[in-house]
Amino acid sequence: MNNTEQLSAVSSHSFTDAVRASFPVYARRIAGKPIAFFDGPGGSQVPQEVAAAMVQYLTLHNANTHGHFRTSEETDAAMTGAREAFADFLGAGSPREIVFGANMTTIAFHLSRSLGRELGPGDEVVVTELDHQANQAPWRRMAEDRGATVRSVPFIAETMQLDYEAMERAIGPKTRLVAVGGASNAVGTINDVPRVTAMARAVGAITFVDAVHLAPHRRIDVQALGCDFLACSAYKFFGPHVGILWGRREHLERLTPYKVPPASEEAPERWETGTQNHEGIVGAAAAVDWIAGLAGTPAGDRRTALDQAFELIETHERELFDRMISGIRAIPGTRVYGVPDGQPRTPTLGFTVPGASPDEVARRLGEEGVFVWNGNFYATSVCERLALDDCGGLIRAGLAPYTTVEDVDRLLEGVRRIAG
């Protein structure tokens, strides 16, 4: 069987059956039914294989690093293995380009202090309205501290896409940093990151990509994106609460991080302040291997396995998303926010329901075991621009590999009932 036939054979109903077997949470019942999880954009469920890896580390290998005894050496090996896993996951040139931290937000603030050393009055920083505050606030604060200017690129409300012409006008000779999201966590827009990074490179600016929402749904290759830094969070793709930063080796070695003097001067460790969350990092690496395992490719070829796994994930989520968005659109009075059909997007749907606030919709669906998010999701500039603050923001439903047709139909039935 060739690769295409293999992917086609697996991406059937048996795909979700195989995926769900890893999630004990589906034994739970609410209103007599399994939970229908649409809350993935806020954090995915964790497979038992990931939890088992964390338990095994804590119970058999737990120690601090760089000691001359067995469990410390095993911890060192686990950290090295985790860097290798994320080098594969992100398409990095070397595991030495992988930095671990608490979460993407903390990593961005940490990095901003170091980048800020090179900024001053007259310099400019570019951010976008479509981004989560974690990819705006650190850079705005940095610019404020250093006397630099912030330029904010708007999005086009009708299409929920960045205004790339405005981006071209914003990026100029004074630009030192461009921060852009891989995808919008509120409405799912996938941004043209290579186009943005090319603009930044043309003026010698550094680029930072927030890939938190993109990483669960699309195969990431930092080389193809052309960025200088990229961050994501493992809890969005079946792992624990750990942040991951990829940085070009030249920047990780050149920039000066804030750290205690005795800490290592070698990259990437020089960027990892204090004792790390070893069990979380082990779990995050296990999440990468769990995703790779969806393709059934023999061990040892993780990058190829990840390529194939994300093909499966995309196919599954695209088919279900078509069902979900067409079903929501068919409910009288609902309003869907997102890119035009056929444009790149994640399987994340932002919408409103007539006569019911997002808070009420989320509560009523939750009582039926259908879990969605409501609010602004820290994408505050999106909701401000769409004038949704006064009505409580959006309802957000996101798909994952464990989502089924039955889940989608329960969501649609619940929304119809509330709208009716």
Image: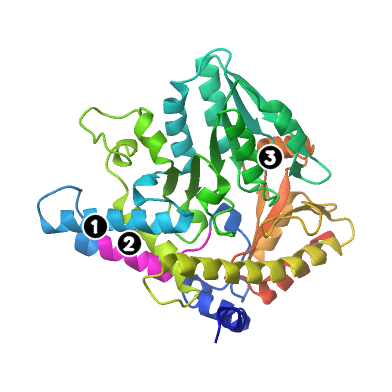
Residue type at the position of mark 3:
Leu
Residue type pointed to by label 1: Ala
Label 3, on which residue? 130
Left or right position of 414 against 307? right
The x and y percentages for residue 165 are: 76, 34
- Please tell me whether the stretch drawn in magenta is mainly helix, strand or loop: helix
The magenta stretch spans residue 247: no
Q: Looking at the image, which is closer to me, 149 or 370? A: 149
Label 3: element kind: loop
Q: Residues within 10 Å of mark 1 (few under 14, many from 20)?
A: few
Q: Nearer the viewer, mark 1 or mark 3?
A: 1
Q: Secondary structure at mark 2?
A: helix
In this rendering, the answer to whether 273 lies above or below 67 is above
Disc 1 to disc 3, C-alpha distance: 39 Å
The image's mark for residue 54 is: 2
Q: Circle 1 is placed at which residue position?
A: 77
Residue at point 66%, 28% (across, down): 171
The residue at the point 19 percent across, 53 percent down is 63
Q: Earlier in the sequence, mark 1 or mark 3?
A: 1
Residue at 58% across, 34% down? 201
Quadrant of the image occupied by residue 153: top right
Which picture quadrant has residue 3? Answer: bottom right
